[in-house]
Image: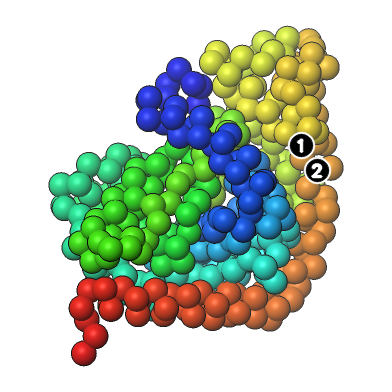
């Protein structure tokens, strides 16, 4: 998204990202990060450059990190499929393959942490139906999913997401623009809880968004790359699958390849992907391809993706061969998340005069 399309408050959050980054480097112990994904499919290269790489960088800088596999949130726009457990374990494999370290970071599924979910009830009492109803992301998702009706879970999931963030007292949430309305509800809930139930000493910190600056990578059909549409390059794809997927990517018929995100979004996206894999600028990649057209561009993208992700994919194959280990990692993360959530719920009950 270009700077021109950002609202003033989004711009302020974007500027703040640079400041936060410096603060994190100077004092990583002052931060706790909560981030996560819905288990709706395999993670793809867009997730990698948009968020996974950043998570690993923050983790390696010494920041405490929790990663939620948002399995209740996945039910907002679809019926739970019988392969959910495979998708969840696949996510764990993706996380570990890219470098999330289960000895320091906590990977958990929010359906397995009862006390986290119980926080949703008091939190619901702190926001009005009208406030939730104004959430633009929920509206967009409802339209995108083609839902005729909105379930109570779809309507209230931003409050559930607030529980994901506040149960562990995260103060930094790395997200894309679409998640900012959820962060705003989370901050409102923290503020209202404090003023209503903990006026002397604020109990919940108001978490901040850490906006990711990476350009949006498009899917092979020219739409937003999404794990639930079949337009993505999954991290786990083989080199051959990657070649097949990128070969059918939408482009245009102009021979001279140029980086013009406004006018040639699909070509620009392939240039960005190639550039990200090679640590170069998309303009450099465009110059190198020159007038050799879309076929040469796709060949460059295929080679760059396959080369860059070869170590991640090798590691992922090893991990996938040991599902028992992946389940043990998740069980351990669930246990650690439960301990944190139990403490928080206990403190919340105490402040809400619910100790009998
Ligand atoms: N809503 C996020 C998504 O759709 C996933 C998510 C769930 C999340 N809980 C979260 C992200 C808490 C950040 C913080 O990708």
Q: Is residue 109 left or right of residue 346?
A: right
As rendered, which of 132 and 228 lies closer to the eye?
A: 132
Is the residue 214 above or below the residue 226 in the image?
above
- Name the quarter where the C terminus is drawn: bottom left
The residue sitting at 48% across, 75% down in the picture is 340
Which residue carries the number 1 mark? Answer: 277
Rounded to the nearest whole Å, what is the CA distance between mark 1 and mark 2?
6 Å
Query: Mark 2 = which residue?
Result: 308
Counting other residues with Cα less than 10 Å from the Cα at mark 2, is it few (<14), some (14-19), or many (20 or more)?
Answer: some
Q: For residue 21, which numbered disc appears in the image?
A: none
Where does residue 169 sit, x and y in percent of width and height? 45, 63
Height in image: 22 above or below 11? below
Labels 1 & 2 near each other (Cβ < 8 A) = yes
Picture coordinates of residue 45 (x, y %)? 66, 44
Residue 246 image position (x, y, % from top left): 69, 36
Residue at image position (39%, 52%) is 206
Residue in view at x 22 percent, y 42 percent: 134
């Amino acid at each position: 998204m270009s700077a021109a399309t950002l609202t003033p408050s989004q711009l302020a959050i974007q500027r703040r990202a640079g400041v936060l980054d410096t603060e994190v480097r100077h004092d990583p112990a002052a931060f706790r990060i909560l981030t996560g994904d819905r288990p709706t499919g395999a993670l793809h290269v867009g997730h990698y450059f948009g968020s996974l790489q950043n998570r690993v960088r923050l983790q390696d800088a010494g920041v405490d990190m929790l990663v939620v596999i948002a399995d209740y949130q996945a039910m907002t726009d679809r019926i739970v499929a019988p392969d959910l457990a495979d998708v969840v374990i696949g996510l764990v494999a993706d996380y570990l393959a890219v470098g999330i370290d289960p000895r320091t970071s906590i990977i958990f599924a929010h359906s397995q942490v009862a006390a986290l979910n119980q926080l949703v009830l008091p939190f619901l009492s702190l926001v009005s139906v009208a406030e939730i109803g104004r959430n633009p992301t929920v509206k967009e998702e409802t339209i995108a999913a083609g839902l005729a009706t909105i379930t109570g879970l779809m309507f209230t999931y931003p409050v559930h997401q607030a529980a994901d963030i506040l149960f562990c007292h995260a103060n930094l949430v790395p997200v894309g623009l679409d998640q900012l309305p959820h962060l705003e509800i989370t901050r409102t809930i923290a503020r209202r809880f404090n003023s209503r139930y903990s006026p002397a000493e604020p109990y919940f910190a108001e978490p901040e968004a850490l906006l990711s600056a990476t350009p949006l990578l498009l899917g092979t059909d020219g739409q937003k790359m999404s794990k639930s549409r079949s337009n993505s390059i999954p991290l786990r794809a083989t080199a051959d699958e990657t070649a097949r997927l990128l070969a059918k990517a939408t482009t245009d018929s102009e021979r001279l390849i140029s980086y013009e995100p406004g006018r040639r979004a699909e070509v620009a996206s392939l240039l960005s992907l190639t550039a990200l894999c090679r640590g170069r600028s998309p303009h450099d990649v465009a110059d190198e391809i020159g007038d050799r057209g879309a076929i040469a561009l796709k060949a460059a993208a295929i080679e760059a993706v396959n080369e860059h992700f070869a170590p991640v994919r090798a590691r992922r194959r090893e991990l996938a061969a040991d599902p028992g280990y992946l389940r043990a990692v998740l069980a351990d993360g669930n246990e650690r998340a439960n301990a944190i959530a139990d403490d928080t719920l206990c403190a919340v009950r105490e402040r809400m005069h619910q100790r009998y």
